[in-house]
Image (tube, helix red, strand yellow):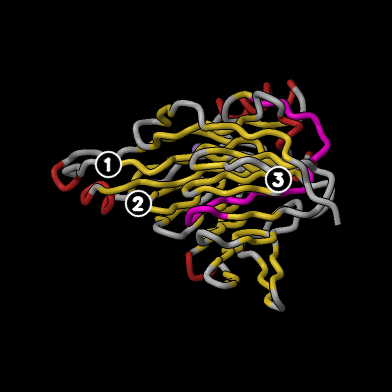
Amino acid sequence: MTAKSIIRIDSAPPRHWVGDGFHVHGMFSYNQDAHLYSPFLMLDYGAPYVCEPRDVANGATPRGVGSHPHRGFETVTIAYSGEVAHRDSSGGGGIIGVGDVQWMTAGSGLVHDEFHSKAFSKSGGIMHMVQLWVNLPAKDKMTKPGYQAITQAAIPQTMLDGASVRVIAGSHNAHDVQAKGAAKTFTPMNVWDVRIKAGQTMSLPQPDGWTTLLLVQSGKIAVNDSNEVGAAQLVMLSRSGTDVSITASQDTQLLLLAGEPIDEPVVGYGPFVMNTEQEIRQAFVDFNAGKFGQINE
Ligand code: MN
């Protein structure tokens, strides 16, 4: 086996607000170097921040993002702290809390909103979340919208000497423990929530040819022969090779994203990501004609 080499290490850019609810670092987006990140389109990292309580019982509105459309891909929201409530026009929705994941397939198109839950709005506290956009291959872009509500308890976990891998999607084999991810995906990928203790080294091999990314959320690690990588940094590894060896010098939490690239053109405009300009124009026509449906109040 050969090691995947480090292609680049990017520090988080300054945060921006998504609506008034999500204060995120845009770690990458399909607007730049889309082919390098495929099958992933976008990663917004909501590093921990304190939200003041809101008096929702007396008419204050929860923070968040109001109704907006998507077509042609999937949105994956992972909550580490705080609670996110979601509703969409295909009837999907629910509240995800600590450790939970919502995996929404926009497919042919839907409208949704994303807010802090009422309970979290009322209590306030630390919001810490990730939103990942996963592309769909051309043949599945117009698939029926879908929604997977994945609770913490449904996410398999492998443990080794105090280090853990929560397998949100894909599969992980370690020391005769095999874990298969909770999420159903359209193309092969691994989405793992990884925790490593200071002083530990962990091997997390990924298939040759796959895009491989590590978002360090807290702590400090070296990856293969890299210098140290710290909180809110994103490591891109080469597609060639398989070995990924992580040594933690502090207790570390990271998100591993690896996937088989989708070798197709990416043409997007905001919340629509398709393969051609014509398909983007059609998305606007269909959305304006009301074909994405509406959220039932
Ligand atoms: Mn959205």
Amino acid type at circle 2 is: Gly
User: Which amino acid lies under the numbered mark 1 shown in the image of this protein?
Assistant: Cys
**Circle 3: is it few (<14), some (14-19), or many (20+) Cα within 10 Å?**
some
Q: Which residues are magenta?
A: 248-268
Which amino acid type is shown beneath numbered disc 3?
A: Asp
When the figure is inspected, residue 100 is found, relative to residue 240, above or below; the finding is below
Which residue, given by chain and number where applicable, does mark 3 sit on? 225
Mark linked to residue 87: none
Reading the image, the residue beneath label 1 is 51
| Residue drawn at x 66%, y 31% as measured from the top left | 273
Left or right of 248? Residue 15 is: left
Q: Is residue 199 magenta?
A: no
How many numbered badges does the structure rendering display?
3
Q: Earlier in the sequence, mark 2 or mark 3?
A: 2
Kindly check if marks 2 and 3 are in contact, taking CB atoms under 8 A apart as contact: no
Q: CA distance from mark 2 to mark 3?
A: 35 Å
**Left or right: residue 128 compared with residue 132:** left
* Residue at the spot of label 2: 82
